[in-house]
Image (spheres, grey):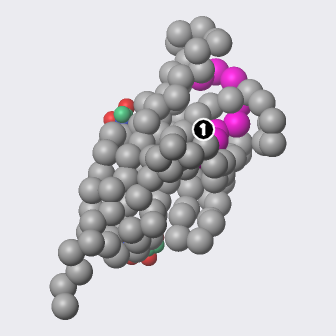
Amino acid sequence: MEKHLMVALMILSLHRSWVNSEDSVEQSPRTLTIQEGMNATFYCNYSSRGSDYLHWYRQDLRKSLVNLFVLITSGEVKHNGRLTVTLNTKDQQSSLHITASQPEDSATYLCAKAQCSPGI
Ligand SMILES: *[C@@H]1O[C@H](CO)[C@@H](O)[C@H](O)[C@H]1NC(C)=O
Ligand SMILES: *[C@@H]1O[C@H](CO)[C@@H](O)[C@H](O)[C@H]1NC(C)=O
């Protein structure tokens, strides 16, 4: 039987409001709805001069943010289950790849640049 379950993913941008306005974070696509089993990739472009940490978070409705990954080094690739993230500091871009999306992947994913170290 054909699978009709859809996976809805959404990402939002977080801005570092406490630093100068030249620093920004932009994510694309804004929203994505795909069929179960398909791959999904989100991109997070940022503009910042500091060598800050790049964080990826997941947020479920009415729940608090869960930190999924922290990246700092260019070329870094990290895996967590079916999730893979990459960081390219030269292009100032990070990607979040979801392999074989499942309904439980439906969530809001956010990326953020932050000067604080992991765990803070
Ligand atoms: C992100 O960067 C890529 C490559 O530099 C560019 O093609 C894309 O349009 C950018 N996306 C956004 C949302 O700025
Ligand atoms: C989905 O992602 C996995 C892991 O990156 C890759 O091996 C596979 O070829 C991708 N499938 C499609 C249909 O792009």
Q: Quadrant of the N terminus?
A: bottom left
Taking the spot 53% from the left edge, 10% from the top edge, the residue there is 21
Residue type, numbered disc 1 = Thr
**Furthest-front residue in view?**
62
Magenta extent: 48-57
Q: Name the residue tied to disc 1.
A: 89
Residue 53 included in the magenta stretch of the image: yes
Mark 1, residues whose alpha carbon is within 10 Å: few (<14), some, or many (≥20)?
Answer: some
The spot of residue 92 in percent (x, y) is: 53, 35
Does 110 sit above or below residue 107? above
Image-based side of 23 in relation to 11, left or right: right
Which of 120 and 19 lies nearest the eye of the viewer?
Answer: 120
Which of 2 and 63 lies nearest the eye of the viewer?
Answer: 63
Q: Is residue 65 visible?
A: yes
The spot of residue 24 in percent (x, y) is: 51, 22
| Tag 1 secondary structure | loop
Q: Is residue 91 visible?
A: no
Does 103 sit above or below residue 57? below
The spot of residue 19 in percent (x, y) is: 64, 12
Taking the spot 33% from the left edge, 56% from the top edge, the residue there is 8
Taking the spot 70% from the left edge, 36% from the top edge, the residue there is 53
The spot of residue 45 in percent (x, y) is: 47, 35
Image-based side of 8 in relation to 23, left or right: left
**Furthest-bottom residue in view?**
1
Give the quarter the ligand 2 occupies. Answer: bottom left
Taking the spot 37% from the left edge, 53% from the top edge, the residue there is 9
Q: Quadrant of the C terminus?
A: top right
